[in-house]
Image (spheres, rainbow, N blue to C red):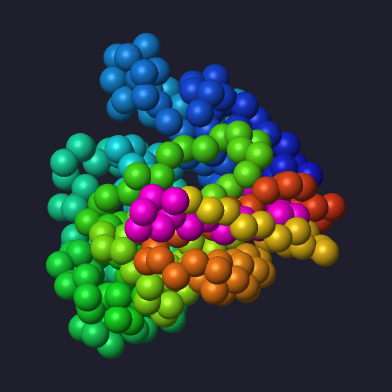
Amino acid sequence: SFSKYRDASRKFMAILADFSPFIEPVGLDEAYLDATGFESIYGSIHQMALAIKQRIKDEPGLCASVGVAGCKVVAKVASELSKPDGLLEVAAGEESLFLAPLPIAKLPGIGKKTERILKGLGIDTIGNLSVTPLSTLKSHFGASGELLHRLASGIDDRKVEPPGAAKSISRETTYGKDTKDRSLLKATLRYLSERVGADLRQRSKQARCITLKLRYADFTTITRSHTLKQTSDTDQTIFDTGEKLLKEALLAEKQQVRLIGIGVSNLIEPGRQLDMLDPSTQ
């Protein structure tokens, strides 16, 4: 039953907390764990991963697949490939070699639609994707093309973020060259809004306040905020609000933009039922 599944999930998270305080749950039966500095207690990261697996087997009596890597995207892929009860470690410096032969669908964040477009471009492995010119990816996916390119190369600088660690969530990006290109600013804003929305939903939070941040060519930084009538966690609401704030800001200031960011605050936990998750799909 679901209550048993939720109890098992609590035990699973409690076991992980014994190994490191830096845990980021993803759903009920999956989590990222930052082992930095704690692995030496066990002799090696490999031994630590084995100890985690053994505890999960002994206490809740469950099998666990573990992926060990220096960044989240590679650890996630390694974990998926080691299901249902394996352990796969990807050594530092070998991330792109490990990812290269895998089909593009194995890269987290690539859904059916993106997969179709990539295959239409003749890109069917993660390795193909990592050597595709950035300009090609940006022309098809906008600002998200850059993220796809980085992830396919095994580059992922997202930190493990324990839940409740932040009272606000924001994402920003600095352009290599100052710009006033509205379509580029909007595309970047959409990409950043999607990232913020995904973070919100991952933490089961909704936001009341949305803030746009701009830094201009002369390094002047401004923020503009809007309070929503109703809390939200959708990418579209974040983007639509950010776009209105962007239009107002661009009317008020004619300078080129160096940095754009979008953030949410006044976070609340909505009174929602927990989603029923099928453990086998996680």
Picture coordinates of residue 89, whole percent (x, y): 28, 38
In this view, 86 is above or below 19: below
Name above or below for residue 242 compared with residue 202. Answer: below
The stretch of residues the image draws in magenta is 201-220
* Position of residue 160 in the picture relative to residue 266 (left or right): left
Where on the picture, by quarter, is residue 210?
bottom right
Q: What residue appears at the point 39 percent right and 50 percent down from the top-left corner?
A: 219
Q: Residue at x 25, y 52 (%)?
A: 154
Of residue 55 and residue 77, the one placed in the foreground of this image is: 77
Residue 35 visible here? yes
Image point (35%, 44%), residue name: 157
Residue occupying image coordinates x 70% and y 60%: 226
Give the image quarter of residue 174: bottom left
Find out whether residue 226 is within the magenta segment: no
Picture coordinates of residue 213 (x, y %)? 52, 55
Residue 282, can we see it? no
Picture coordinates of residue 24, whole percent (x, y): 54, 38
Residue 42, image x, y percentages: 35, 15
Extreme-bottom residue of the structure: 120
> Within the magenta stretch, is there residue 219?
yes
